[in-house]
Image (spheres, helix red, strand yellow):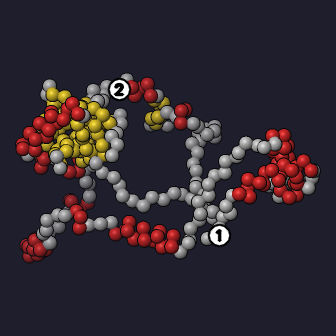
Amino acid sequence: MRSIWKGAISFGLVTIPVKLYSATEQKDVTFHQVHREDGGRIRYKRVCTLDGEEVPYSDIAKGYELATGEIVVLTDEDFEDLPLTTSRRIDVLQFTPAEQIDPIYFAKSYYLEPDAQGAKSYVLLRNALESSGQVAVVKVALRQRESLATLRVRDGVFVLETMLWPDEIRTPDFGFLEEDIEVRAQELKMAESLITTMEADFDASEYHDTYREALQQVIEAKVAGKEVIPAREEEEAGPAVDLMAALRASVEAAKREREGGGAAKPKKAAAAKSKDSKDAAKDEEKPAAKRKTRKSA
């Protein structure tokens, strides 16, 4: 694993230098958008809606839209001036029983590894927290966003679990909650009996992603059936052996492009125009002959 953040746990007057790692990863079969005919990758451009010009990343800023439709543009300097007091600290605010925190608040989990000089303090706080049976409620800023979080111990390592703010939790507003729905005692007893029958200790290893496995089998079947479009390496132009001939051929190709409305004529027809262009065409075809031809699926 590679650390994505460095900072320190601030616990009273104790500072524990730590590195932060993503504790989870999404397992999924990833796809690219491609051209159905030849498998070519689809590329998207960043285009301004006002002038139609492509915009480089260096010229892109964040914009906040007002109710009037006007845009307020914020620069990197605007964000740098914001008061993020926990920009490099994990501030311990309090300790509380874990069952008091509704799991709906949890967003993402991270592992914390101590730096060499902070290992003893790390282990001390870890052992004390684990024996208390509580979790630490902390505040931390990651990727320019300040969050509440909890610190708990898992397999001897601190797990930082970022949390949503209270105003980010939606209130369920469903019609059936206002209805007077009657449940008979016998029905409730039967449902409770079913729950009791299905009780078991949770073992995550017993479950697996059947959809992802089936999708992987479909891909493997495609490969086995040779229904695959071979990957084609992008051709890199090498240095011209005869610079003048290459320039002349380039000029003639540009003329054909202009006269033909974008459709270039075959090389053989172009080579018939002059001896020089024929030589240039041969020079151009030599490296092409070494390339592997694309087999049909």
Task: Identify the residue at the far right of this view.
Answer: 274
Residue drawn where x is 30% and y is 43% of the image? 21
**Depth check, front residue: 43 or 272:** 272
For the point 43% across and 25% down, which residue is it? 77
- x%, y% of residue 28? 39, 59
* Front-most of residues 214 and 64: 214
Q: In which quarter of the image is residue 152?
A: top left
For marks 2 and 1 on the same chain, the one whose residue lies earlier in the sequence: 2
The number of callouts visible is 2
Residue beneath the point at 82% across and 53% down: 282
Numbered tag placed on residue 33 in the rendering: none
SS for callout 2: loop
The residue carrying pointer 1 sits among few (fewer than 14), some (14 to 19) or many (20 or more) residues within 10 Å by Cα, namely: few
- Residue 190 position, x and y percent, is 11, 75
What secondary structure is found at the residue carrying circle 1? loop
Res 258 seen here: no
Q: Is residue 150 toward the left or the right of residue 124 in the image?
A: right
Q: Where is residue 81 in the image (x, y as percent from the top left)?
A: 37, 23
**Residue 245: percent from the left, percent from the top?**
84, 44
Q: Do the residues labelled 2 and 1 touch (CB within 8 Å)?
A: no
Q: Distance between the residues labelled 2 and 1?
A: 58 Å
Question: Circle 1 is placed at which residue position?
Answer: 296
Pointer 2: residues within 10 angstroms few (<14), some, or many (20+)?
few
Q: Which numbered tag is attached to residue 82?
A: 2
Q: Is residue 51 left or right of residue 118?
A: right
Taking the image as drawn, is residue 207 in sight? yes
Instruction: Identify residue type, mark 1.
Output: Ser
Residue 33, above or below 93: below
Q: What residue type is labelled 2?
A: Leu
215 and 116: which is toward the camera: 116
Residue at 19 percent of width and 43 percent of height? 158
